[in-house]
Amino acid sequence: MQDFAIGVDVGGTNLRVAAIDSGGQLLEKLSLSTDMQAGREAVLQEMCAAVAGLRERHASSTRLAGIGFGVPGLIYLEEGKI
């Protein structure tokens, strides 16, 4: 069974999530809008749903090796901040 990884790029206006196999081939890419006005929890839920969907769609033929995240700045753990 081949491995795959999921990469997440969180931007101020866009959320991009992709599944890549161990040979570097793109399996699937999602491009979504990031609604920062909806708040931190909404952005996190959207991101988690995208990752879960990719994982489910590719887990039958490949094995998830890991997930990487890229964010454009600091991540605040306090509620009300993004």
Image (spheres, rainbow, N blue to C red):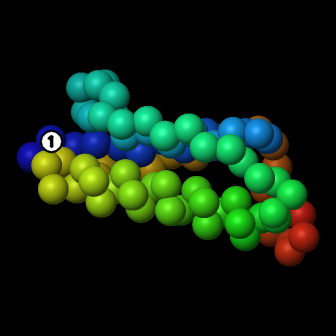
Residue in the image at 15% along x and 56% along y: 60
Quarter of the view holding residue 23: top left
Residue in the image at 68% along x and 44% along y: 33
Q: Which residue corresponds to mark 1?
A: 2
Q: For the image shown, how many numbered marks are present on the structure?
A: 1
Q: What x and y, as percent, mark residue 34? A: 72, 48
Circle 1 Cα neighbour tier, 10 Å, few/some/many (<14 / 14–19 / ≥20):
few
Residue in the image at 86% along x and 74% along y: 79
Q: Image check: 44 left or right of 35? A: left
Q: What x and y, as percent, mark residue 3? A: 22, 43
Q: Image check: 37 left or right of 27? A: right
Tell me which amino acid carries mark 1: Gln
Residue in the image at 44% along x and 50% along y: 67
Compared to residue 80, the image places residue 22 above or below, namely above
**Residue 44 seen by the camera:** yes
The C terminus lies in which quarter of the figure?
bottom right
